[in-house]
Every structure is written in structure tokens, then in C-alpha cells.
């Protein structure tokens, strides 16, 4: 996975100018003592997020780190991921400010997102997103994700919990961190069972569902295409207000997705164009999924008059003269 999240040119540069690279890594190293931590915002699989202060308000994700012993590989992975973060500057991506890179205190410092996550809007508050609003959100998502991919970075964990809405502006968080699970405990895999966070399965492309094994989440074959599949699921959440395969047991979801069975859209009242985007993103074969540049231009071309939630094949309910 290591090659996944860093583009070729960056690898090249690291090899050619190691000294310059280590200098620039230092620029992003924040001494842990300089951080002020306030209340816990929440705890996820990889760490605990605090509201903090470092030259202003920040979010600090303190990673749950296992004792590393003599094995420096996980630390290298973390540094490698930090190296990918510092390359990101886009208005739809959370601002990376630096990291604490001295074990056992490993942390990632980003701007503090205002507003709520899409998850909170859709699943907790049950806010409705009409088609126009859904398209605006999806366009910004496609823009941020297209930028990440152009930089050779795969998100690996795109989901509504990692998308903030700040006054209508989309801010994507948590990109590229998935490999850090190697460093973490308090994780989801226990014994021979597969621990699965709620809602996560809906974002897994068929090739990921087929590769699921206990303890193997970090070796999953993530790719740009698996990010596009996850984007499709966020698009579905916006339109329907639920995750796909709602209420079904994990084994049934894994089996269906792995076989290429898709969530039915029969009850989704939306135009054909809108459903087509969903079905393309959820294509069984990774190479059939569009890239984000293509998705963005498709979203921009959606005719406004067809954005209203109308059935794709409206039934004329007019009463006939002779009935
Ligand atoms: P998972 O680990 O499965 O991704 P998660 O997304 O809930 O779950 P975290 O990413 O660790 O876990 O986030 C924990 C909490 O902190 C969440 O409520 C999240 O919305 C919040 N959070 C994360 N980053 C920021 C940020 N930059 N600004 C404000 N809140 C944040």
C-alpha cells in the first residue's frame, strides 16, 4: 500500500534529495509540548480527536499507538503519510498544519472544521438534501477528490463521517490515513472475527469486499477506483438519506457486493441522469468506474430542470374520459 498514497515523482525526489526532504519534514514537525489540548471531540478507529490550540484553533488527532519496540516500519509509514499530507492545498480538503512525529506521541494537527459532518446531517439530524443541494455537495467532493488523485493520493476512507459541511462548503478529512492502522490498537479486528464499523461496508467496492479477511484491513487493494465507488455511496446517502443495504447483516452485504449485486434504486425518485451516476460509480469492474474529472463534468452538465425529484418514468395519473 505504501506506493498507493505517494506519487512517483515524490518518491523520485526523496531518493535524489534526501537532505532537502528531511529538512522539509522538520518544518512540519510540531513539538508535542507546543500543543494545547482541550476537550475530546470524538474517538475513531485510529485515534482520539481533540479541540486544541497551536497558533490558533486546531484539531489534534492523537493516534492510538502500540509500543513500537525496535520496529521502525510503522513509524516510517506514519512519516510517509505525513509527507503526502503536506502536499495538499485545496479548499475542499482539511488544512494539514503539521504532525508530532516523536513516539510515543504521534499526532496530526489540522485546521478545526466548523459545521457538522455529512453523517450528522443525513443520519443523525435526518436533514433532507434536495437534488440541487446534493449536486452542489457532490461537485465539491469530486473537485477535492480529483485534486487528491491528481497528486497521487488515495483517500481509502471516503465516507460521510469524513466530510464536513461548513456553510455549504465541503471539507474532506482523514485522507490517506488508513495504513496508520498498523500503528494503532483499539482497532476493529478481534480474534478470528472481522470487526466492522457501522456503515463502513456500504463504501467498500466489490474488489475490497472480496479481499476482506480478519486482521487484513490494511492490506486491502485500495485504488482511485475504490474511492470512486465510495463517492457513489455518499451520493446515494445524499439522495436517499440512508446507507445502501440498510438493515442487512454484514455477511449478506459482503456477499452481495462481492458478487456484484447493487442496492436497488427502484424507490429512489430521481432523474435517470442522477441514477446513472450512481450506477457508474458502483460498477462491478473497477475500470468501468468514471474518474473524478469525468464525474465533475457530468455533474455540471445535469440539466437544472431535471434536478427536481421526479420519477424517472413518471406514470400519468390523469383520469381517462371513459373511466
Ligand atoms: P473512523 O475512525 O471510523 O474514521 P471517525 O471519523 O468518527 O471514525 P475520527 O476521524 O477519529 O473518527 O474523528 C473523531 C471525531 O472528531 C469525529 O466526530 C470527527 O467528526 C471529529 N473530527 C475529525 N477531524 C476534525 C476536524 N479537523 N475538525 C473538527 N472535528 C474533527
Image (cartoon, rainbow, N blue to C red):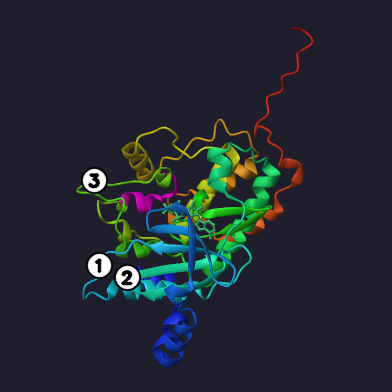
Q: Is residue 287 visible?
A: no
Please, which residue is most extreme toward the top here? 323
Residue 3 pos. (x, y %): 38, 73
- What range is drawn magenta here? 202-210
- 1 or 3: mark nearer the eye: 1
The residue under label 1 is 67
Picture disc at residue 193: 3
Above or below residue 116? Residue 309 is above
Q: Is residue 128 visible?
A: yes
The residue under label 2 is 104
The picture quadrant where one finds residue 54 is bottom right
Answer whether labels 2 and 1 touch (C-beta < 8 Å).
yes
- Horizontal relation, residue 51 to residue 316: left or right: left
Secondary structure found at label 3: loop
Name the quadrant of the N terminus: bottom left
Secondary structure found at label 1: loop
- Horizontal relation, residue 222 to residue 37: left or right: left
The picture quadrant where one finds residue 111 is bottom right
> Residue at point 47% right, 62% down?
155
> Residue at point 65% right, 41% down?
129
- 3 or 2: mark nearer the eye: 2
Amino acid at each position: 500500500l505504501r506506493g498507493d498514497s505517494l506519487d512517483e515523482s515524490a518518491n523520485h525526489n526523496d531518493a535524489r534529495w534526501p537532505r532537502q526532504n528531511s529538512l522539509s519534514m522538520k518544518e512540519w514537525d510540531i513539538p508535542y509540548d507546543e500543543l494545547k489540548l482541550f476537550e475530546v471531540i470524538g474517538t475513531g478507529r485510529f485515534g482520539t480527536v481533540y479541540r486544541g490550540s497551536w497558533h490558533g484553533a486546531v484539531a489534534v488527532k492523537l493516534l492510538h499507538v502500540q509500543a513500537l519496540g525496535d520496529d521502525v516500519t510503522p513509524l516510517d509509514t506514519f512519516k510517509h503519510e505525513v509527507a503526502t499530507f503536506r502536499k495538499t492545498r485545496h479548499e475542499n480538503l482539511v488544512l494539514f498544519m503539521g504532525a508530532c512525529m516523536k513516539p510515543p506521541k504521534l499526532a496530526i494537527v489540522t485546521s478545526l472544521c466548523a459545521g457538522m459532518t455529512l453523517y450528522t446531517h443525513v443520519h443523525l439530524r435526518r436533514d433532507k438534501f434536495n437534488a440541487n443541494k446534493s449536486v452542489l455537495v457532490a461537485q465539491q467532493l469530486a473537485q477535492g477528490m480529483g485534486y487528491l488523485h491528481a497528486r497521487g493520493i488515495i483517500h481509502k476512507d471516503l465516507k460521510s463521517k469524513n466530510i464536513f459541511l461548513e456553510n455549504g462548503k465541503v471539507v474532506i478529512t482523514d485522507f490517506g490515513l488508513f495504513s496508520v492502522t498498523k500503528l494503532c490498537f483499539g482497532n476493529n479486528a478481534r480474534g478470528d472475527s472481522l470487526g466492522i464499523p457501522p456503515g463502513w461496508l456500504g463504501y467498500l467496492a466489490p474488489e475490497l469486499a472480496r479481499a476482506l479477511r480478519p486482521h487484513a484491513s490494511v492490506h486491502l487493494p485500495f485504488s482511485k477506483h475504490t474511492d470512486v465507488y465510495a463517492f457513489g455511496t455518499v451520493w446515494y446517502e445524499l439522495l436517499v438519506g440512508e446507507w445502501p443495504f440498510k438493515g442487512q447483516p454484514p455477511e449478506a452485504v459482503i456477499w452481495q457486493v462481492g458478487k456484484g449485486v447493487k442496492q436497488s434504486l427502484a424507490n429512489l425518485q430521481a432523474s435517470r441522469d442522477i441514477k446513472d451516476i450512481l450506477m457508474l460509480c458502483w460498477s462491478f469492474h473497477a475500470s468501468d468506474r468514471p474518474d473524478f474529472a469525468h464525474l465533475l463534468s457530468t455533474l455540471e452538465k445535469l440539466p437544472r430542470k431535471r434536478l427536481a425529484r421526479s420519477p424517472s418514468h413518471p406514470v400519468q395519473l390523469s383520469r381517462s374520459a371513459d373511466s
